[in-house]
Amino acid sequence: MHPGWEALGDPSRLAIVHRLAERPRAVGELADELPISRPAVSQHLKVLKGAGLVVDQAIGTRRVYRLSPVGLAALRDQLDTFWRRALDGYQDIVGETEEIP
Amino acid sequence: MHPGWEALGDPSRLAIVHRLAERPRAVGELADELPISRPAVSQHLKVLKGAGLVVDQAIGTRRVYRLSPVGLAALRDQLDTFWRRALDGYQDIVGETEEIP
DNA sequence: CGCATCGGTAAGTCGTAGCTTTCGTTCGTG
DNA sequence: CACGAACGAAAGCTACGACTTACCGATGCG
């Protein structure tokens, strides 16, 4: 639903991803560690879930969130494509400087 | 100077990166293809440059921008780390379901 | 030299994303 | 069954970022 890159663009959401990379956590657990309120964390998790970067699991009254490998892999692959194309362009600049002295 | 993830968070900047992935382009060239004005493109390029995602090269009156491999690799590696940690967490959930029946 | 092209900077406007507070709902527990 | 814990949803406020127009410096060309 959400573009994915915009999800990681926000500092608070990136911080959440960092915490979830260590281990899965509940909403309140994240809110305790971050300088924002718990509803704010919920809103961010909603965006991250919409982008397919996290998945949630209900355990009693708590909701445990964890990173989603598929969503992260999609962004990583796209970034990897950019990186490869950037290398190709870097080859060009070397070739040009030799051809146009 | 800029966090890097916020740079790719904006749709216009992501579009610029997409174009630069095809081939290096000048500022006006990008502005013609995008639905925003040329100064807006300049501002976005400034952010991307601050994040180390692009490098510029003056050719006459024109300024040609191209993707920077190092900046992109940094983000890709960090995303790859997230992905690997996500896979580890996925292993845990399988183990738990077997241990707590 | 003027003149045009190309691009960065400054100033100002406007929308929206992020946050908070409040409320409603679900689930576990005594 | 009543109470508390945990979370999501709604409403409202505010600050910031993305855009625009206008201006100015630098380079190339006749």
Image (cartoon, coloured by chain):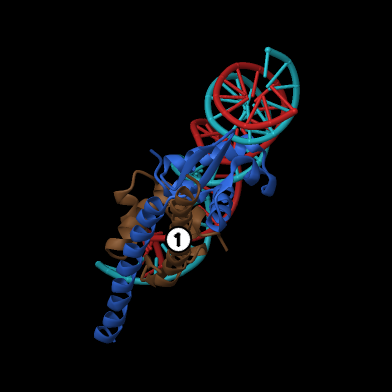
Chain colours: A blue, B brown, C red, D cyan
Q: Residue at x 39, y 50 (%)?
A: A71
Residue A78 in picture, x, y percent from top left: 34, 58
Residues A84 and A48: in front is A48
Left or right of C13, for residue B40: left
Secondary structure, mark 1, is helix
Q: Chain of mark 1?
A: B
- The quadrant of the picture occupied by the C terminus of chain A is bottom left
Q: Residue at x 52, y 41 (%)?
A: A45
Instruction: Please name the residue that numbered disc 1 is placed on.
Output: B79
Residue C3 in picture, x, y percent from top left: 35, 57
10 Å crowding of disc 1: few (<14), some (14-19), many (20+): many
Residues A91 and A65: in front is A65
Quarter location, residue A55: top left
Compared with C18, A85 (above or below) is below
Quarter location, residue B83: bottom left
User: Given the image, on which type of amino acid does mark 1 rest?
Assistant: Leu
Quarter location, residue A28: top right
Residues C4 and B59: in front is B59
Q: How many marks?
A: 1
